[in-house]
Amino acid sequence: MSVPGGRNVRVDSALRASLDELRLEAEQLRASLARVVVAADAERRRIERDLHDGAQQHLVALAVNLELARELADSDPAEAKALLETIGRDVRDALEDVRALAHRIYPPLLLDRGLAEALRTAAAGARIPTRVEVTALDRYAPEVEATVYFCCLEALEEVAARAGAGARATVRAWSEPGVLVFEVVEDGVGIAANEARQARGLDGIGDRLRALGGRLTVSSGPGRSTRVSGTIPLAS
């Protein structure tokens, strides 16, 4: 014969456990939102710094050299011509700086051609040799494609920063029923699991994924590969 009092104790214990879990999730959400705000502020400062140190400096030099070329046009045409060649190189450098900055903010290729092409282009400029294995992907909501793209870039940055000599990376993305999956695998010496969990870039990846109901998984250890993987639910 069951004892009502015992059943009440079990129910009460289950309720307390549920409340504790809700409190933990709320604390994690607050921490995640705080990191998102800090990361957004840091990104704005980085963009401002890149504009100031890159494109803006090129444009200032262009303005100075154009004025000088104007002054030399009559008195020393040969020198003016040489200066115009320098100005042409400065224009190309300024354009490359602007393109690179725009690519980091939101690559036009991602919007125009989709995730696979954008990842292949990004991998070509990664700090370690990177192979991309992405096939038969559909187009997804812009926020989904952007999240996977930037998560992969941040994961590549993290593994490249800790990888040893000769390390390589592989980026994969594929769809499964109801979810979009990606992983970045560093085929090198690996990093300690606690170091992986403490990486600031991985916090950012987790925050991006949680914003869309996704999940981050990191597996690593000295002497074996580091694997950063994530899933994002897809609307039915």
Image (cartoon, rainbow, N blue to C red):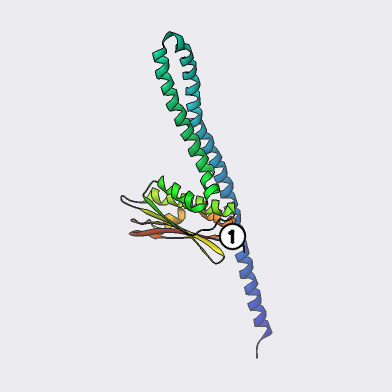
Amino acid at circle 1: Gly
Whole-percent x, y for residue 91 in the image: 47, 28
Whole-percent x, y for residue 41 in the image: 57, 42
Q: Secondary structure at mark 1?
A: loop
Residue depicted at x 46% and y 53%:
198
Image position of 7 (left or right of 81): right
Please tell me whether residue 229 is drawn above or below residue 200 in the rendered image.
Answer: below
User: Which one is in front, 103 or 153?
Assistant: 103
Res 210 → quadrant: bottom right
Q: State the residue position of label 1.
A: 213
Residue depicted at x 45% and y 30%:
92
User: Which one is in front, 110 or 185?
Assistant: 110
User: Which one is in front, 77 or 58?
Assistant: 77
Whole-percent x, y for residue 113 in the image: 52, 49
Please tell me whether residue 157 is drawn above or below residue 25 in the rendered image.
Answer: above
Image position of 198 (left or right of 16): left
Image position of 143 (left or right of 184): right
Please tell me whether residue 185 is drawn above or below residue 96 in the rendered image.
Answer: below
Please tell me whether residue 93 is drawn above or below residue 6 in the rendered image.
Answer: above
Count numbered badges in the picture.
1
Q: Residue furthest left?
A: 166
The answer to whether residue 130 shows anywhere in this view is yes
The answer to whether residue 203 shows anywhere in this view is no
Whole-percent x, y for residue 236 in the image: 62, 64
Residue depicted at x 42% and y 19%:
83
Q: Residue furthest bottom?
A: 1
Disc 1 residue crowd, few under 14, some 14–19, many 20+, Cα 10 Å: few
